[in-house]
Image: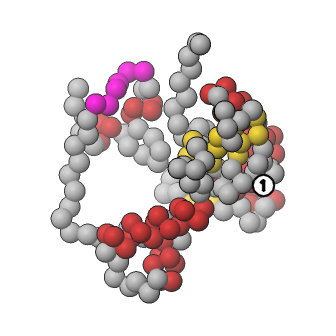
Amino acid sequence: VVFDRDACRLGYRDSRFKQEPDRYLVTSVRLRLTRSFEPVLSYAGLAEELERAGITRPTTRDVSDAVIRIRRRKLPDPATEGNAGSFFKNPVVGAKVADELRGRRPDLPAWPQPDGRWKLSAGWLIDACGLKGAQVGGAAVSERHALVLVNRGGATGRDVAALAARVRDAVADRFGVQLEPEPRLVRFEP
C-alpha cells in the first residue's frame, strides 16, 4: 500500500502507523524537499543559540550545528550511556486543566495549541515529581534530562517498562496528567 502525506495522518509524535500499530510495516519513504532553504527556528533555544554564535542568516549547516550543540548540552550521549531517548510525549490537556495546574505551579511550561488546548512539558512534570535519577534495575531517569530513560548497565525491557510505569503513575498522582510513551512498546514472551 502507498499512502500520500494526508493518508499518513502525521502529527506531533503521531501517525496512522502508531494509531494502527499492527496493521502496517513501513518499508520505504519518499520525501519531496524544497530547493530553497527557509530555516524553522521554533526549536526551543535555537534562535538564542544562533544569536550567541553571531549568526543572523543561518545556513542549513548553522541550524544543524546549533541543534546538535543544544542537544549535547541537554541530553545524555548515546555513545557513552545507552538510552531510550525522549520517552514520553508532552501531554496536551484542556484549558481548564492547564489553568488549574498553572495556578498551582506558575513555573510549569505550557504552550497554547490551535484547538484551545495546552501542551505541557513532560520533562518538567517528571522532574517536579523528584524522579531524576530514579532507578528500577538497570534503567534510570537521566540526571541530565528527566524525559530520557537511560541504561545504567544491564537494563532489561522489564526494567524500562517498570520504570516507565513508576514515572507515569507518579505524574498522574501528583498532577492528574496521563503521560503517554513516545516509543511503541512491543510485548513478547521470553
Residue at the outermost left position = 35
User: Magenta segment: does it hold 163?
Assistant: no
Spot occupied by residue 110 in the image (x, y as percentages of width and height): 63, 60
Toward which corner of the image does residue 37 lie, by quadrant?
Answer: bottom left
Compared with 117, 73 (above or below) is below
**Quadrant the N terminus occupies:** top left
Q: Badge 1 is on which residue? A: 128
Query: Which segment did they paint magenta?
Result: 22-27
**Of helix, strand and loop, which mostly describes the magenta segment?**
loop
Lateral position of residue 98 relative to residue 9, left or right: right
Q: Secondary structure at mark 1?
A: helix
Q: Residues within 10 Å of mark 1 (few under 14, many from 20)?
A: some
Instruction: Kindly identify the amino acid type of the residue bearing the numbered disc 1.
Output: Ala
Name the one closer to the observer, 100 or 146.
146
Spot occupied by residue 36 in the image (x, y as percentages of width and height): 21, 69
Residue at 38% over, 21% down: 23
Lateral position of residue 159 relative to residue 36, left or right: right
Q: How many marks?
A: 1
Spot occupied by residue 7 in the image (x, y as percentages of width and height): 29, 36
Residue at 45% over, 78% down: 50
- Residue 165: in sight, yes or no? no
Residue at the outermost top position = 189
**Quadrant the C terminus occupies:** top right
